[in-house]
Amino acid sequence: MKQLTCILSTLILLYINLQQIFFAQAQTNSKKSQDNITGSSTVLNYAMLNKTLKFSKERAHYISPFDFPEEYKEMVTLYIDKKYKKAIQKLEQWEKSKAVDIDFFALLGNSYDLNNQPEKAVETYKRGIERYETSFLYSHLAIALMGQKKYNEALAAFEKAIDITYLGKHNYYYWASKLLCSSNDPISGLIYGEISIVTDPGSEHNYELSKLMYDTYKRIITFNEKIPSVTIPNHDTQKTDTTSFNAIYIKVLTMSVAGETSFTLSSLKTIRKNFVTNYYNMGYDRTNPYPLFKHQQAVLQAGHNNAYNYWLFGAGDEAFTSAWVSQYKDNFKQFTDWAEKNEIQLNASPKLLHN
């Protein structure tokens, strides 16, 4: 949380561009597909991905030479120099005569993927996972699957990584949110996105996530002649179990938009306040407890709802947020002090079921 305080304190002192202060440079946009998650009945619709998904496999497969043992130095150097074919040759020779570990499978799989051999990359990661079931290998497997537009399988791999490593600072929540916000389950995308920012407030992905989540809320909360409604694109409510997490979320969110006449950052802040209040008043915290909602309630009870939501979704309306922070810098500082001492409590994997 020290990163959070540092970042937000800088904003308070300088009153400048949120894009530079809160978060890092955004990435956006490309492709669509529908694929099956291996071993799962879940099939999501990714019709929005042609507008929202774009990523660099080279950047996603980035490795630091300092993360590898000395014996990998030659292969890592070839990899960093983008001499993937030579790296593959060296690694394949290595496997014939020496013991292999997690680092080996990651380096070989990445080299295959960046050498335009995605099928061999996937095969390599899966071989590694059979021996070392780690979130590290699952995340690189997911990147390779995204490159093949197998988005459901990629999501399953990212969520497996979340299951294994749900604590700490990593990009698994980010990628899951990025995929889901562009599917017909944007609710899960919103939740993963918020967890990502809250657990890693200094991440380079947070500006992009802030804008993505704001736009996702704006897409599902619509107004017809100032009358609000909640609509999930490509979501068949008739086929949704009314006791499912998504159905409950939609029900409570629909109640929470009542009284609003337009979508703004200010109205979103009020809607989310109403959501937490309604969720707990209706007893859903007992039947469907979820760590993020408990954290939101703690924020609300501490009196930081405005600052928290403007920080979280500030990229959606930078001018408004900068003006608010400038006017209420003391409130904002109180929030950062509170946030540093009150981190979200994840006592188990917050992986969601996609209905």
Image (cartoon, rainbow, N blue to C red):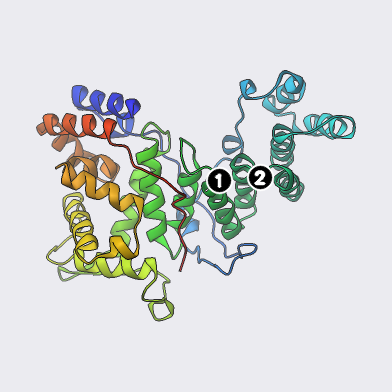
Q: Residue at x 62, y 20 (%)?
A: 66
**Mark 2, residue position:** 133
Picture quadrant of residue 250? bottom left
Task: Tell me the crowding category of disc 1: few under 14, some 14 to 19, or many 20 or more residues within 10 angstroms, Cα based.
Answer: some
Q: Nearer the viewer, residue 241 or 218?
A: 241
Asked whether, in this view, residue 135 is left or right of residue 319, the answer is right
Q: Amino acid at mark 1?
A: Ile
- Tally of marks: 2
Q: Residue at x 46, y 62 (%)?
A: 183
Q: Nearer the viewer, residue 300 or 118?
A: 300
Residue 347 screen position, x and y as percent: 42, 46
Element under disc 2: loop
**Mark 1, residue position:** 164
Task: Tell me the crowding category of disc 2: few under 14, some 14 to 19, or many 20 or more residues within 10 angstroms, Cα based.
Answer: some
Image marks 2 and 1: residues in contact by CB distance under 8 Å = yes
Q: Amino acid at mark 2?
A: Glu
Residue 343 screen position, x and y as percent: 32, 37
> Residue extending furthest right?
97
Q: Residue at x 22, y 67 (%)?
A: 282
User: Mark 1 or mark 2, which is nearer the start of the sequence?
Assistant: 2
Q: Quadrant of the C terminus?
A: bottom left
Picture quadrant of residue 182? bottom left
